[in-house]
């Protein structure tokens, strides 16, 4: 395939790059190629990790050496455009916007020339593609945010951002899954645990899925948080309608 590069990234991993931009079209090729590899069941491949524009492939060189792996990867590239990607699953994530939970909502609104209510409406009206996970376990890099509410990063990052915080940086939005430093503008917080090492599946979201936020009141946030802590809250999902 044109413009595809296969690059060694160590003695047991390679990166297959499909472009140089952040776009859903490029990311679809990444996801399609991942499906091709999973179906092919190439011996020696131990893990695949999708990013915005590439697929990292970890392999066991004692099972398949680099040369043989590269030949197999090149041969499978031709199948990428023939793969149909299933409709993505949408995770419905509750968010308490503004106040202590979203201390930067007022700044984002002022920067956009909008009211806080308009920022909330715009932010919660989209289905965001999860391009990739990274930075911390379960941190979601989401695409598809309306540029009207784009905002610059903080000039000085915070030392500690509470888990569940929903932020904006440039034209991206995402959720901090654990307490961590960070420089995104915080507009709200979800009581849902995106990462919980005690769960059978510690990381809730997956690359290729979508997230839709919906606003909740303080009382609703507190109720959901109690259910999360009791292990009885279930994140609602639905299949995304393409087109």
Image: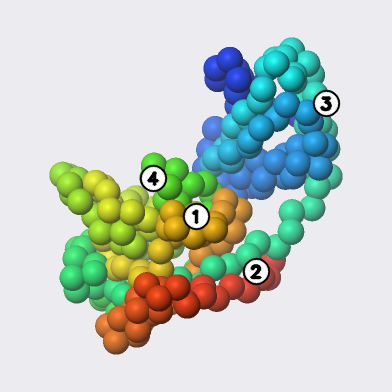
Residue pointed to by mark 1: 203
Q: Is residue 224 above or below residue 76?
A: below
Q: CA distance from mark 2 to mark 3?
A: 32 Å
Circle 2 — which element?
Answer: loop
Crowd rating for badge 3 (residues with CA inside 10 Å; few <14, some 14–19, many 20+):
few
Circle 1 — which element?
Answer: loop
Circle 4 — which element?
Answer: loop
Residue 109: give x, y in percent of width and height.
Answer: 25, 68
Q: CA distance from mark 1 to mark 4?
A: 11 Å
Residue placed at 54% from the left, 57% from the top?
A: 201
Q: CA distance from mark 3 to mark 1?
A: 33 Å
Residue 106 visible from this viewpoint: no
Q: Tag 1 or tag 2, which sits nearer the N-term?
A: 1
Crowd rating for badge 2 (residues with CA inside 10 Å; few <14, some 14–19, many 20+):
some
Q: Tag 4 or tag 2, which sits nearer the N-term?
A: 4
Relative to the observer, which residue lies in front, 2 or 124?
A: 124
Q: CA distance from mark 2 to mark 4?
A: 26 Å
């Amino acid at each position: 395939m044109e413009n595809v590069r296969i690059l060694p990234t160590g003695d047991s991993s390679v990166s297959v790059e499909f472009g140089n931009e952040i776009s859903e079209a490029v990311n679809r090729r990444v996801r399609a190629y991942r499906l091709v590899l999973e179906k092919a069941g190439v011996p020696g491949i131990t893990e695949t990790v999708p990013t915005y524009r590439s697929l990292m492939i970890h392999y066991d060189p004692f099972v398949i050496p680099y040369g043989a792996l590269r030949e197999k990867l090149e041969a499978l590239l031709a199948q990428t455009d023939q793969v149909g990607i299933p409709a993505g699953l949408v995770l419905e994530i509750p968010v308490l916007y503004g106040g202590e939970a979203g201390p930067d909502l007022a700044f984002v609104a002022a920067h956009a020339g909008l009211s806080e209510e308009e920022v909330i409406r715009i932010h919660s009206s989209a289905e965001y593609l999860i391009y990739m996970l990274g930075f911390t376990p379960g941190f979601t890099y989401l695409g598809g945010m309306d540029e009207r509410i784009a905002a610059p990063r903080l000039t000085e990052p915070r030392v500690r951002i509470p888990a569940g915080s929903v932020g904006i940086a440039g034209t991206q939005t995402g959720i901090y899954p654990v307490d961590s430093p960070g420089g995104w503008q915080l507009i709200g917080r979800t009581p849902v645990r995106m990462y919980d090492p005690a769960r059978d599946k510690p990381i809730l979201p997956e690359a290729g899925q979508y997230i839709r936020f919906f606003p909740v009141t303080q009382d609703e946030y507190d109720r959901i948080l109690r259910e999360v802590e009791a292990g009885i809250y279930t994140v609602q999902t639905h299949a995304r309608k393409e087109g």
